[in-house]
Amino acid sequence: MTKVTIPEPPGDLVSRPRLLTALDDGAEHAMVFVGAPAGYGKTVLLADWAGRRRGAIAWVSTDAEDNDDRLFWSAILEAFSGCDRIPAGNPVRTLAVPAAPGTDLAFLATLADALDTVDEPVLLVLDGAQEITDPGTWRGLQALLRHQPSGLRLVISSRCEPPLPLVRARVAGRLLEVGVNRLRFSPEEAGTLVEAAGPGIPPQQVGLLVTRTGGWPAGLRLAAASAARQGNLADFFAGRDRAVLDYLTDEVLAPLTVAQRDLLRAISICEEVPAGLAAALGDRPDAEAMLRELGEPAGQVVHSGGSPARHRLPPLLRTYLRAELLRRDPERTRSLHASAARWFAEHDRPASALLHSVRSGNTTRVGELLRRHAVTLFLTGEHNVLRLGLAVLGDRRAVSSPLLALVSAALHLERGEPSAAESQLSCADVAWPAEPEAELTVLRQLVRSRLAQVDRGPAQAVRAAEQIDEHLAADTGLSGLTALHRIGTLTARRDRGSARDALSRVADAAESADHPFLVTQCLITLSGLAGSDGDYRVMETLARRVLARHAAHDPHRSLEGAQVSAQLAFGSLLRGEAAECVEHAKQIGRMLGDAPARAARNLGLIAETLRGAAEFELGGWHSGLRRMRRARTRLGTGRSFSAEHAAWCSVLEHRAALRLGAADQARETLRWAQPIIAGSGELLLMRARTQLRLGRQDAASSVLRSLSEEDAPMLLPWAGIEASLIGVRAALAAGARERAVRSLDEALRAAEPGDVRFPFVFAPSDVITFLTARLGRLGSGERFACQVLALRRELRTPQMPAPLTERERNVLRLLPTQRSIDEIAEDLTVSPNTVKTHVRGIYAKLDVRSRRDAVATALRRGLLDTEFTDFTG
């Protein structure tokens, strides 16, 4: 009988070990309650769990017929009879169902006594218990639970709390609850589901999908089905998929009253509904009470929280209710937005007031709100709302106000669009009043300063910051932003201590004033200073704080997002997490888009260098090296970027080029860096590395000694670790073991505080062999060394192929030309025998046996692409 049979899990089951383990642990509780609205996978989860414990399970799929007390208990006894844990002679198997079992105390006592004799408890699963609405049916189960037979554990799933003693069991610690929050799919679980569903949903959209559905299992399955039908998620995200609307109507909205459904449509225009707004939108005084009722545990058609209460609809339900409202009644939709705008304006919520004014189409109110609140909204980070408001006003009305033109310019600069910003600045100048207010004057100075930061050189940025009038700004809301710009003059003078102190003060004041944009700008600058000082743990901690803030305010294109992603990519690479570095570097590109600003261009190229270095270490040697070279050549030789950035690019590319045997590219990198980072320790590091590569270990050691003897400071604090490891290699090659020990100890001491694993994790094998041999004698560096070696084993990067010599690379360039050996010898002015020797070396290193295979392998590995670029450029 299907009613008492454990359902078969669906073919696309995503097993959820974290929940199965929780249920296993909860099997010892008196009760397990799995409570959530429709579509949260309650039955699927319990069926998967019960299928693994069949001998212990008595399963009943409840339905409306169970409102008949006798039918309900007949199903329970039948389920007990099919359970292996109940012995053949147990009275439960022969117990007759009386006329009114729920009130028949003799029947219930006999059942309780029989269950008390069972050696191991039976798990009675009542699935879909919301179908039982008759109090009489529940009465008998309540009486049975009062006796609490030792051989019974109740597992119940329902869309609402059943009339059982849950509170008493909860207080006594005898209840396991699996609710909405635990049933939501994690991004990993959603990824598994999407992968099984087919190619309609790209992996990079999984995170967005989880956000838009709130992790609702049914929503994710509906998304997969929509993508299979449409080939993408456009209709699903826009609320246009009819199948999704039908499911929501039948499963979520059908049990609600007409008044409840109408209220949900009304509040769907808002992402969050503060206490009091629902009454204004629904035009009914009991709206708040109705929402609280809809937000009760298990049902949770509305999510409520906070004091005073704030209400939110589940994301997918809100999307479809809002879309349906707009289709059916666009005029009511505009009216609701106008009501929301008035309510938010009255309650001093300018961002929400502006957003709903935009959506209501009331351009007069939009203009009023912008003129009154634009500067505040800019400082609070509400940039997307500002952009929407300015777009609704249109260019003509926006640029006629110097204030709005300047705010528009500032917004363009945060997207890395200097030309558009300069155009807006010109409009502000044309409309400039004869007697401007202090705030307007300071705002123009700040925009010019930001323009210099974004699209001019460091010197121009300092001059523009110095021209901001601090005294004039002191009496305006822009004093904090002014202080931040002026702090740039301290960092330019490398007065980092004073800069850090000043930034902390500005950040604290901005936090108190609720200016998130200013706070994040301070944190980004502090993170950059920490990186420059080698305090990489602090750098990453601050960057992650910024990332969380940024995602909440402007998850799309911005210089702010690109900067923090660059810091995280930098930190990931230094920790030896090359794959993580690649992902952060890709995010930088998405944040920048095609922004033309010089700062955006430099950030993008630095990101390409970091990505190339990470790809190189992950086994993409030639493609990674090619990416680094391309980024360097596009940076050019000007000083629009810092010496620190030039050191990063050159040290990483030079290191990779020498390791792969591309000596010509290594020389080119060193020549590029010399005029930009002249006098730095990084130049000496690269020279020592070159000498070591040529087998001149004494010369390498001599260059390294000059690092401490000469006035050659390191621009990159971590580069000193790299220098120490070069010293280890030089000492080992010279047979100077004690010197190698000292250099290794120095490297470990310098690396551990900042968790700088990169130089160790991706070190050549001779360093790793020596480090491994020293285990047990490393003192305070022991723990860090073990972490490094564990990460290296975990990564399991492929072994780097033996590099081609320069002569072999010259020969390889000519192999695709089909010249004969004699002709190649003539081109290279060497003997044919020499060419044959080089060809044999090429074949051995590429593991091939013919010229055709050598060319194909070289192309596949990127050798010929790199070499032709080098040869022609």
Image: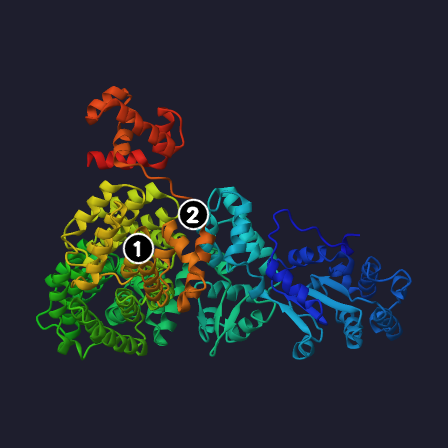
Residue 824 position in % (x across, y down): 24, 23
* Residue found at the very far left of the displayed protein: 434
In the displayed structure, 48 sits above or below 463; it is above
> What residue do we see at 60% from left, 61% from top?
18
Closer to the camera in the image, 775 or 807: 775
> What residue do we see at 45% from left, 75% from top?
276
Q: Amino acid at mark 1?
A: Ala
Residue 864 position in % (x across, y down): 30, 33
The residue carrying mark 2 is 797
Q: Earlier in the sequence, mark 1 or mark 2?
A: 1
Residue 246 position in % (x across, y down): 57, 52
Q: Amino acid at mark 2?
A: Thr
Q: Quadrant of residue 832?
A: top left
- Give the side of residue 427 with respect to residue 689, left or right: left
Residue 199 position in % (x across, y down): 49, 42
Instruction: Determine if residue 718 is in view.
Output: yes
Q: Secondary structure at mark 1?
A: helix
Closer to the camera in the image, 203 or 745: 745
Q: CA distance from mark 1 to mark 2?
A: 26 Å
Given this view, does label 1 or label 2 mark the residue nearer the observer? 1
Q: How would you rate the neighbour count of disc 1 (Cα within 10 Å): few for under 14, some for 14-19, many for 20 or more?
A: many
The residue carrying mark 1 is 731
Q: Secondary structure at mark 2?
A: loop
Q: Quadrant of residue 269?
A: bottom left
